[in-house]
Image: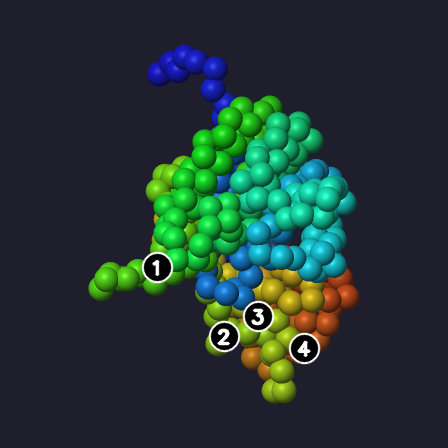
């Protein structure tokens, strides 16, 4: 058939996390579809922001990432998380204070975010968190006054405005928004997130995160690294419902090598006992692999990455 019109091909960015790339895949194309808005949501302390940092750094290691934060950040941790990913570009944090030391409104901060997306050097953006947006009405009026729909209105306006540079610039770029999960009330089942219907309709993917405590990497005395499980709850260009895993070390962020270890363990490629093995080959104790990852000794994990690649290639042939 013949297709007329000036349209852009859909691009995908590989996340460097095996099971997440597979969960987001469609017709053998791996990775995150761009351009578009990707929601990352879950309860407190499941690594929503940390995963957003990881994904944004993968778009372009020398690019320009815009961070609009509404919850407060540890700048040293953010820097460390990005640098651990090999990011050597620019992180622009939207100012929360004006030049007179006064708190800016969240509406103004979102306007700045939109303007930054017209910059050709911008490679990705992060809004952290949609659920923490406080409309100016809430700040300036009495606490008992109801403005429940204002947040959704602000989010809808922001989404409409940023949609132009998000889709219209030459290089495709994603916008990651983190969000809080809430239980469905009134006898319903499952969970939902803030932001209203506008966000629900336009996002290209929605990733729900929760801890997998039984899989945590630990010694007999302490947890060394946390395993987070996720599920793709919306995927515009592919199949929803697939699960994925990744590993976080609180001081260092998302760990590519240890995440590969967990993926290989889930697939039965490695045996994770007192000693981790691939076939008859021993890779060492779990504490030794943890230390190798922290020290950046990637060569220790090469057999795992090679085995995962072979598994992926085999899946593509079936």
Q: Nearer the viewer, mark 1 or mark 3?
A: 1
On the image, numbered disc 2 is attached to which residue?
A: 213
- The earlier-in-sequence mark between 4 and 1 is 1
Give how far apart the Cα atoms at labels 4 and 3 are. Answer: 13 Å
**Mark 3 surroundings within 10 Å by alpha-carbon count, few (fewer than 14), some (14 through 19), many (20 or more):** many
Quarter of the image with the N terminus is top left
**Mark 2 surroundings within 10 Å by alpha-carbon count, few (fewer than 14), some (14 through 19), many (20 or more):** few
Residue at 45% over, 31% down: 160
On the image, numbered disc 4 is attached to which residue?
A: 287
Residue 148 percent location from the top left of the image: 37, 50
Check the image and report above or below for 315 versus 43.
Answer: above
Give how far apart the Cα atoms at labels 1 and 3 are. Answer: 23 Å
Element carrying mark 2: helix
On the image, numbered disc 1 is attached to which residue?
A: 191
Check the image and report above or below for 117 versus 257.
Answer: above
Element carrying mark 3: strand
Q: Is residue 306 left or right of residue 148?
A: right
**Mark 4 surroundings within 10 Å by alpha-carbon count, few (fewer than 14), some (14 through 19), many (20 or more):** some
Element carrying mark 1: strand
Front-most of 125 and 5?
Answer: 125
- The earlier-in-sequence mark between 3 and 2 is 2
Q: Are marks 1 and 2 in contact (CB under 8 Å)?
A: no
On the image, numbered disc 3 is attached to which residue?
A: 226
Give how far apart the Cα atoms at labels 1 and 2 are. Answer: 20 Å
Front-most of 105 and 251?
Answer: 105
Give how far apart the Cα atoms at labels 4 and 1 are. Answer: 36 Å
User: Which residue occupies the extreme bottom position in the image?
Assistant: 220
Residue at 69% over, 55% down: 78
Residue at 39% over, 57% down: 144
Q: Can residue 309 be seen by looking at this rendering?
A: no
């Amino acid at each position: 058939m013949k297709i007329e019109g000036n349209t852009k091909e859909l691009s995908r960015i590989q996340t460097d996390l095996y099971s997440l790339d597979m969960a987001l895949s469609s017709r053998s194309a791996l990775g995150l579809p761009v351009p578009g808005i990707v929601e990352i949501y879950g309860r407190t302390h499941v690594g929503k922001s940390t995963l957003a940092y990881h994904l944004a750094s993968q778009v372009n290691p020398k690019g320009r990432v815009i961070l609009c934060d509404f919850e407060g950040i540890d700048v040293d941790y953010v820097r460390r998380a990005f640098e651990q990913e090999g990011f050597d570009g620019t992180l622009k944090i939207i100012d929360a204070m004006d030049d007179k030391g006064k708190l800016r409104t969240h509406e103004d901060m979102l306007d700045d975010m939109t303007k930054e997306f017209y910059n050709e050097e911008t490679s990705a953006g992060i809004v952290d968190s949609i659920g923490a947006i406080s409309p100016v009405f809430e700040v300036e009026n009495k606490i008992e006054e109801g403005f429940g729909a204002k947040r959704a209105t602000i989010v809808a306006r922001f989404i409409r405005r940023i949609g132009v540079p998000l889709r219209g610039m030459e290089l495709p770029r994603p916008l990651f928004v983190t969000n809080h999960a809430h239980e469905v009330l009134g006898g319903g089942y499952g969970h939902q997130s803030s932001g209203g219907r506008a966000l629900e309709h336009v996002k290209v993917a929605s990733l729900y995160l929760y801890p997998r405590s039984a899989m945590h990497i630990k010694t007999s005395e302490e947890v060394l690294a946390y395993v987070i499980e996720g599920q793709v709850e919306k995927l515009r260009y592919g199949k929803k419902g697939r699960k994925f895993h990744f590993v976080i070390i609180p001081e260092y962020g998302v760990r590519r090598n240890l995440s590969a270890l967990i993926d290989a363990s889930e697939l039965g490629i490695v045996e994770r006992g007192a000693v981790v093995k691939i076939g008859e080959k021993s890779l060492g104790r779990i504490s030794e692999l943890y230390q190798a990852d922290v020290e950046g000794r990637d060569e220790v994990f090469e057999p795992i990455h090679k085995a995962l690649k072979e598994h992926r290639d085999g899946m593509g042939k079936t």
